[in-house]
Amino acid sequence: MRIWEAEHAIGVIVIVHGAGEHYGRYDWLIERLNREHFHVVAGDLPGYGRTRGKRGHVDHFQQYIDTVHHWYKEAVAFELPVFLFGHSMGGLAVIRMMMEKQLPVRGVILSSPCLALYDPPNKALTAAAKTMHRIVPGLSFKNGIRAEHATRSPEVRTEFLKDELFVHTVSVRWYQELSKAMKVSLDHAYEFPNVSLLVLQAGEDYLVDKTAAHEWFNRLRIEDRAMREWRGLYHELFNEPEREEVFRFMLYFTWQRLGRL
């Protein structure tokens, strides 16, 4: 975990990365948030980046929840308003943590949250995973994340292919835990706490099923919520050529919740 401090900070944002990646892929976003006077707390989820243990594996989704909760407690220490930002699987981890911990954050921002997969494994593999995750939980297969499906940016695609920390496989246990977390989040959306929420969804998403994000959003029982689908943009909204526009939209959300408008 790392902390990037800003001058004259007005708040703290905790960044939770998605499947396969690591916090190093958020350098641009961290720099922009620091420039706008936000401290940033971020780290690598278990099984990713520079963490120890088997790559692309987790015994229980609870490990992600506990990790993000630890980052939140580091953010709270600044005694400033805290926002949680989660991308894709990181968004799912934020959702599950908020459902479980009911934290008094100033706001939650989700970027293309993973509530269902765009191209899930076939039924045979899914059925096998339900058994195999108990027998050989570390058995791995390709995660299907490809640069050309994540972003339209040629520069980011090139960086993606050169990234030695990116994890291209997942274990059957990981898939089983992800599947359970997605189902619980959808079935129990009413348990998400009444905090300010912004969902930013890619319009051309080839990694997660955007219809599930809309379905989850419509099931919520909270007062202050907003969702925007970015037409034509791919999954990694903050790596798209239009990322500055997406960032300004997110920033406006934080300013409103801080009473700065």
Image (spheres, rainbow, N blue to C red):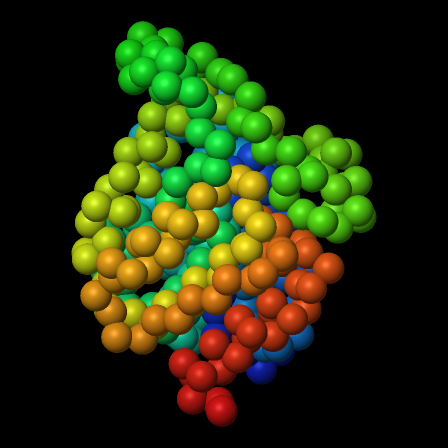
Q: Measuring 49% from the left and 24% from the top, which residue is drawn there?
A: 170
Residue nearest the observer in this picture, 246 or 65? 246
Q: Measuring 45% from the left and 84% from the top, which residue is drawn there?
A: 256
Q: Is residue 227 above or below residue 45?
A: below
Q: Is residue 127 above or below residue 248?
A: above
Q: Is residue 231 left or right of residue 209?
A: right
Q: Position of residue 74 (x, y in %)?
A: 42, 59
Asked if residue 45 shows in the view, the reply is no
Q: Measuring 48% from the left and 42% from the top, which residue is drawn there?
A: 208
Q: Position of residue 123 (x, y in %)?
A: 37, 19
Q: Position of residue 33 (x, y in %)?
A: 60, 69
Asked if residue 7 shows in the view, the reply is yes
Q: Measuring 31% from the left and 54% from the top, which residue is drawn there?
A: 216
Q: Is residue 208 above or below residue 97?
A: above
Q: Is residue 106 above or below residue 69?
A: below
Q: Position of residue 190 (x, y in %)?
A: 19, 57
Residue nearest the observer in this picture, 137 or 35? 137
